[in-house]
Amino acid sequence: MSSPTELEDALLRLARPGMTATQLFSQVRALYPDASKKETTHAALAAMLRVSGNDVERALALQDFAIKGRGGDE
């Protein structure tokens, strides 16, 4: 299992404005295949909070990802 901080860092590196939640989840899954959807969604929320004050576009991309990922675990 990956640490939440590792997932947060990966999400921050990968998230781009205009990226769909599916695209972001696929990229994170390629790096961390053992991370659950729930863990990844929680990491996205934490990452969003971490950057919300100084990178609004990235925070919005992470928010979109977290909202779309909230529907259960894989």
Image (tube, rainbow, N blue to C red):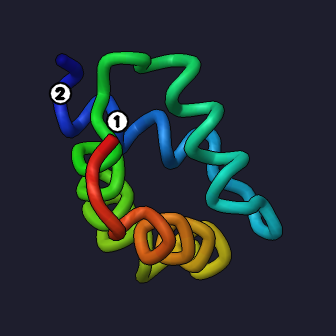
Please give the residue where the numbered disc 2 appears in the rendered image.
3
Q: Which element carries disc 2, helix, strand or loop?
A: loop
Seen in the image, is 65 located left or right of residue 70?
right
Task: From the viewer's perspective, tell me whether residue 66 is left or right of residue 68.
Answer: left
Q: Position of residue 39 (x, y in %)?
A: 23, 44
For residue 71, what is the image quadrant? bottom left
Between 69 and 50, the one lying in front of the other is: 69
Give the residue displayed 34% in from the left and 45% down from the top: 37
Residue 49, picture quadrant: bottom left
The residue tagged 1 is: 7
Whether pointer 2 and pointer 1 mark residues with C-beta atoms closer than 8 Å, the reply is: yes
The percent position of residue 8, horizontal first and vertical second, equals 35, 44
Q: Which amino acid does label 1 sit on?
A: Leu
Using the image, determine if residue 15 lies above or below residue 18: above
Considering every residue shown, the one lying at the far right of the view is: 18
Question: Measured from the top left, where is residue 17 in percent x and y?
Answer: 76, 67
Separation of marks 2 and 1 at Cα, in angstroms = 7 Å
Q: Nearer the viewer, residue 26 or 54?
A: 26
Q: Which amino acid does label 2 sit on?
A: Ser
Tell me the quarter of the image containing the N terminus.
Answer: top left
The residue drawn where x is 53% and y is 32% is 28
Q: How crowded is mark 2: few (under 14 residues within 10 Å), some or many (20 or more)?
A: few
Comparing 74 with 17, the one in front is 74
